[in-house]
């Protein structure tokens, strides 16, 4: 794991043949710092816990956004900034398209 934001670590691993990643948010850290920058996609869509990307090879969907506080699962969803407005639950993860920030 490596620290990618103050108090937030990122872990990459393979699961069932696919690349996965986790963010580990330490007590007192601000989870709203987490952003995923997408470059090279024709389009980006967020719908709840699903993230869709349009590429020259076709559409790619990442499903299953799981967020836990201790052992309790809490609500979370992806939010695309600048192209969609989605009501924010307790935790949101921002997708920032190149040139928007």
Image (cartoon, rainbow, N blue to C red):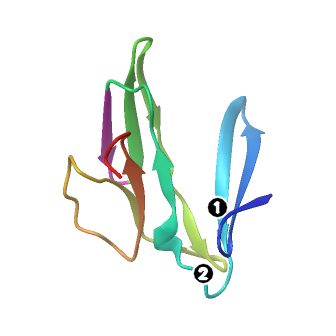
Q: Quadrant of residue 29?
A: bottom right
Residue 62 or residue 80, whichever sits in front: 80
Q: Which residues are magenta?
A: 43-48
Q: Which numbered marker is on residue 29? A: 2
Report the number of numbered marks.
Answer: 2
Q: Which mark is residue 23?
A: 1
| 55 to the left or right of 4 | left
- Earlier sequence position, callout 1 versus callout 2: 1
Foreground residue among 17 and 82? 82
Name the residue: 20% across, 50% down: 84
Residue 48 sits above or below residue 53 on the image: below
Q: Residue 34: image x %, image y %?
A: 51, 62
Magenta part, dominant SS = strand
Q: Identify the residue at image location x=50%, y=68%.
A: 33
Q: Is residue 64 above or below residue 56?
A: below
Q: Nearer the viewer, mark 1 or mark 2?
A: 2
């Amino acid at each position: 794991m490596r620290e990618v934001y103050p108090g937030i670590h990122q872990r990459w691993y393979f699961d069932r043949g696919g690349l996965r990643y986790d963010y580990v948010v330490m007590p007192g850290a601000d989870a709203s710092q987490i952003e995923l920058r997408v470059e090279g996609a024709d389009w980006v869509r967020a719908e709840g816990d699903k993230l869709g990307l349009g590429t020259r090879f076709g559409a790619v969907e990442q499903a299953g956004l799981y967020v836990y506080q201790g052992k309790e699962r809490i609500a979370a969803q992806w939010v695309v900034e600048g192209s969609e407005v989605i009501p924010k639950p307790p935790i949101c993860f921002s997708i920032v398209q190149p040139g928007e920030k």
